[in-house]
Image (tube, rainbow, N blue to C red):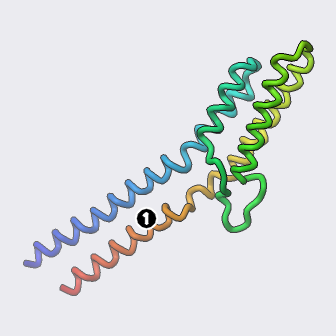
């Protein structure tokens, strides 16, 4: 009987640990990884001077990044506000799109340099926001369930 209870306890604790690991990977995949991928695209934007590729990469960024919200929930700043970052991406697309058809090559070159500078700024802002994405409500809740569940299961089975 005692061996059966010990096995049940180990299976339950392992189940909670596996749940915690899966929840951590899913949380990373859904909240942090898109920002890391966006930083990679921003590096491509800073390295290229092809206006068509810049527009494609900016549109990809608009899809990857959240539409609104701010991951810094304690003292939020404008630098980490995803709504403002989306507006910056809209501005970059608009300015670059207008400059592609401009007859003056100098204007196009200035807009490309401006896009490079804005991409560097957005990259810095995302770097500030990434640590706060780990502290999302769902991520903290799943870790809490894992810890409390494991401790509760151990206590219940220890009493029996």
- Residue pictured at 60% horizontal, 38% vertical: 63
Q: Quadrant of the N terminus?
A: bottom left
Q: Position of residue 29 (x, y in %)?
A: 48, 46
- The residue under label 1 is 142
- Residue pictured at 84% horizontal, 22% vertical: 99
- Residue pictured at 16% horizontal, 69% vertical: 7
Quarter of image, res 89: top right
Q: Position of residue 70 (x, y in %)?
A: 67, 57
What residue occupies the far left of the structure in this picture? 1
* Above or below, comparing residue 29 to residue 71 in the picture: above
SS for tag 1? Answer: helix
Q: Quadrant of the C terminus?
A: bottom left
Quarter of image, res 78: bottom right
**Pick the front one: 110 or 149:** 110
- Residue pictured at 62% horizontal, 32% vertical: 60
**Pick the front one: 15 or 85:** 85
Q: Is residue 146 left or right of residue 12?
A: right
Q: Position of residue 5 (x, y in %)?
A: 15, 75
Q: Position of residue 54 (x, y in %)?
A: 71, 25
Question: Dot 1: within a 10 Å radius of its alpha carbon, few (fewer than 14), some, or many (20 or more) residues?
Answer: some
């Amino acid at each position: 009987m005692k061996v059966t209870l010990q096995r049940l306890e180990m299976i339950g604790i392992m189940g909670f640990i596996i749940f915690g690991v899966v929840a951590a990977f899913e949380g990373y995949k859904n909240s942090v990884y898109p920002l890391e991928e966006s930083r990679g695209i921003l590096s491509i934007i800073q390295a290229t001077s092809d206006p068509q590729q810049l527009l494609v990469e900016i549109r990809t960024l608009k899809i990857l990044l959240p539409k609104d919200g701010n991951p810094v929930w304690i003292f939020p700043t404008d630098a980490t506000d995803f709504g403002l970052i989306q507006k910056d991406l809209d501005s970059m697309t608009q300015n670059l799109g207008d400059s592609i058809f401009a007859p003056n090559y100098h204007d196009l070159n200035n807009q490309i340099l401006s896009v490079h500078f804005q991409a560097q700024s957005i990259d810095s802002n995302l770097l500030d926001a990434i640590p706060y994405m780990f502290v999302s409500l769902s991520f903290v809740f799943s870790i809490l369930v894992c810890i409390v569940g494991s401790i509760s299961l151990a206590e219940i089975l220890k009493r029996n």
